[in-house]
Amino acid sequence: MADIADDANDLAQLEIQSILRNRMPTKSAYYKLCRFCKEPTPDGHAFCDEDCRDDFEKRNKGA
């Protein structure tokens, strides 16, 4: 027979599983468009190429 500690542990485990299921998408799922030119990117990349990455970094250097 389960005691109160077992019940609390089961509830905590359910909450953890729920949080993991509903977490934000991974970086590879998040980036679909280049952060600089808005063109489609390779899976998991924030930029479509090195030029866009460099231009983005130059533009945001002062920020």
Image (spheres, rainbow, N blue to C red):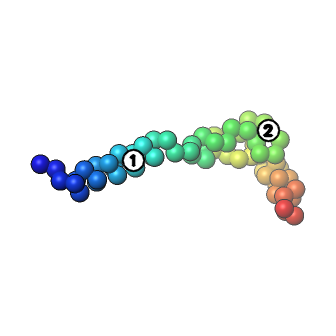
Q: Amino acid at mark 2?
A: Lys
Q: Residue pushed farthest bottom?
A: 62
Which element carries disc 2, helix, strand or loop?
loop
Q: Position of residue 59 (x, y in %)?
A: 87, 56
Horizontal side of 10 relative to 62 (left or right) equals left
Q: CA distance from mark 2 to mark 1?
A: 37 Å
Question: Earlier along the polypeptide chain: callout 2 or callout 1?
Answer: 1
Q: Quadrant of residue 5?
A: bottom left
Q: Quadrant of residue 62?
A: bottom right
Which residue occupies 46% across, 46% down? 19
Q: Which residue is under mark 2?
A: 38
Packing grade of label 1 (10 A; few <14, some 14-19, many >=20) is few
Q: Position of residue 3 (x, y in %)?
A: 17, 53
Q: Quadrant of the C terminus?
A: bottom right
Packing grade of label 2 (10 A; few <14, some 14-19, many >=20) is few
Q: Position of residue 23 (x, y in %)?
A: 52, 45
Which residue occupies 56% across, 45% down? 24
- From the viewer's side, name the closer residue of 3 and 14: 3
Which element carries disc 1, helix, strand or loop?
helix
From what the image shows, is residue 33 above or below residue 63?
above
Q: Position of residue 51 (x, y in %)?
A: 83, 50
Q: Quadrant of residue 18?
A: top left
Task: Check contact, mark 2 vs mark 1: CB within 8 A.
Answer: no
Which residue occupies 67% across, 42% down? 31
Q: Which mark is residue 30?
A: none
Q: Amino acid at mark 1?
A: Glu
Horizontal side of 54 relative to 31 (left or right) equals right
Q: Residue pushed farthest top?
A: 40
- From the viewer's side, name the closer residue of 53 and 63: 63
Q: Which residue is under mark 1?
A: 15
Which residue occupies 45% across, 41% down? 21
